[in-house]
Image (tube, rainbow, N blue to C red):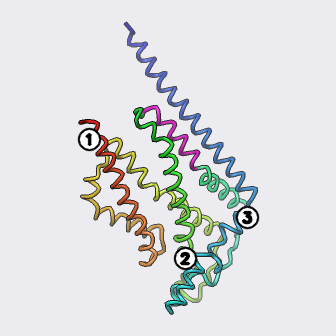
Amino acid sequence: MPSPNDTQNDHKQGFLDHLDELRSRLIKSSLAVVFMGIFVFIFHQFVFDKIILSPRSPEFITNYLFCKFADLMQMPSICINNKPFDLISITMAGQFSMHIYTSLVGGLILAFPYVFMQIWLFVKPALHKNEKKYARSVIFYSSLLFFVGVLFGYYLILPLSIHFLGSYEVSSQIENQINIISYISTFLSVLLAGGVVFELPIVIYFLSKVGLMTPAFMRTYRKHAYILILIVAAIITPPDVFSQLLVTLPLAILYEISIGISGRIARKDAALLD
């Protein structure tokens, strides 16, 4: 018969094993982010000129379409970023620090599928056998939703934010001189916010699996959820109704999809109990 000391040592060993596993997953994830960050760092000319600085240009696809639509509807106020602003660096290490910062965040975005896979592999042993078979699909859909969110932020939220914040003035006597640090911080924040927000169905999936979320609860508090979605849209977009509605619509669709996901899980759990 095992002694209490043996049981305590087993629990301690199991806890240490989990810590060692977590450390291993974190190291692998960090190395992946650094590796992709180096890739971004090396090709900085393309990353900055063609990706980061492009949304403020009139030739950017979103800006071009908005201005074309403005000409068609005879509503010039809809045209965005038709006069690109200049960017300045006001500190000695400003451009270099932004180069490093952009490389790390860009590495995180590019390495997201691998990082999420490491997280999934860490929690996988705690799942049931019938849940483990969904590992690949969860990794695929979470990565897909993340990148769709990043692209949504890049092609819609970001141009609107740049136009509003870059052209806003409280007085004609004040000239906007946008610092590169401010611009890139806004750029990366919008991209990450878009990617994280679009993970809503995955979050609901896990919450439903552990019983913390049900389709009945989500339907009952649908109005409250829509108010929260409006608040989130107001936070990540410029403070105008048009931009908020453009962001609210896909978030509301994601919420309805999440209800369906939660309902499917609830039906499966009910079938297993029967």
Viewer-proximal residue among 78 and 18: 78
Indicate the amino acid at tag 2. Leu
Q: Which tag, 1 or 2, sits closer to the chain's start? A: 2
Q: Are marks 3 and 1 in contact (CB under 8 Å)?
A: no
Image mark for residue 165: 2
Quadrant of the image containing the N terminus = top left
Q: Quadrant of residue 274?
A: top left
Cα gap from disc 2 to disc 3, whole angstroms: 25 Å
Q: Residue furthest bottom?
A: 74
Q: Please state the extent of the stretch shown in magenta in the rendering.
A: 112-126
Mark 2, mark 3: which one is toward the viewer?
Answer: 3
Indicate the amino acid at tag 1. Ala
Q: Is residue 222 above or below residue 271?
A: below
What residue does disc 3 label? Answer: 46
Indicate the amino acid at tag 3. Phe
Identify the secondary structure beneath mark 2.
Answer: helix
